[in-house]
Amino acid sequence: MNTVRGWLLATATAAWLCAPTPAAAQDLNPYRGQTSVHEAGRQAYNQHCAECHGNDARQSVAEAPDLRRLDSFCRRLRDQALKADCTADVDRYYLRSVHEGKVRAGVVHMPAWKGVLTPQEIWSIRTYVETRPMDPPKRTTSVDAQRAAGER
């Protein structure tokens, strides 16, 4: 009988430890697809992000990547369950990046925003960025342009 009680207690404890918490639920964008938050996201983006990531979330330099491309791989997936898992992974990556910032070789490329931006601002920015149209792919490179101009 003690073995059964021990097993039940262990099972109940494991279920409690694995249950989703409100904090874990906040790791996913609660505003995805809600057009009502786009304006708040645009304003927060322009105030906090545009300087490095560019107007309309367009900036394609290594230090400040084009945020519209964060989940570009996920958008190409056809399997809806896999697409949802992929998007959730990107949400967690985005949140960690915003909270912790980006530091490479001791150089701060993006400051940590945890405690500066509210969760509502963080997710409204993500929702806004997700609505921004992608630029068409480039057909030529800078090398092609140099060759066309006669430079070597």
Image (spheres, rainbow, N blue to C red):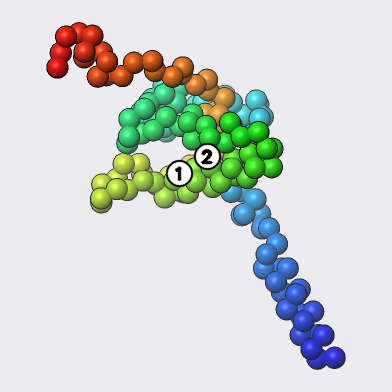
Quadrant where the C terminus is found in the figure? top left
Label 2 packing within 10 angstroms: few (<14), some (14-19), many (20+): many
Q: Residue at x 68, y 58 (%)?
A: 20
Front one among 115 and 141:
141
Q: Residue at x 66, y 58 (%)?
A: 21
Front one among 26 and 13:
13
Image spot of residue 143 (x, y percent) = 24, 19
Q: Which residue is mark 2?
A: 122
Q: Is residue 150 visible?
A: yes
Front one among 118 and 82:
82
Say which amino acid is labelled 1: Val
Residue found at the very far right of the displayed protein: 1
Asked if disc 1 and disc 2 are in contact, CB closer than 8 Å, the reply is yes
Image spot of residue 150 (x, y percent) = 16, 9
Q: Is residue 95 visible?
A: no
Q: Which residue is mark 1?
A: 98
Image spot of residue 77 (x, y percent) = 61, 34
Say which amino acid is labelled 2: Ile
Q: Residue at x 46, y 22 (%)?
A: 56
In this rendering, the answer to whether 26 lies above or below 54 is: below
Front one among 104 and 151:
151
Residue found at the very far top of the displayed protein: 149
Q: Is residue 67 left or right of residue 16?
A: left
Q: Is residue 144 left or right of residue 64?
A: left
Q: Residue at x 56, y 46 (%)?
A: 89
Res 37 quadrant in image = top right
Image spot of residue 46 (x, y percent) = 44, 26
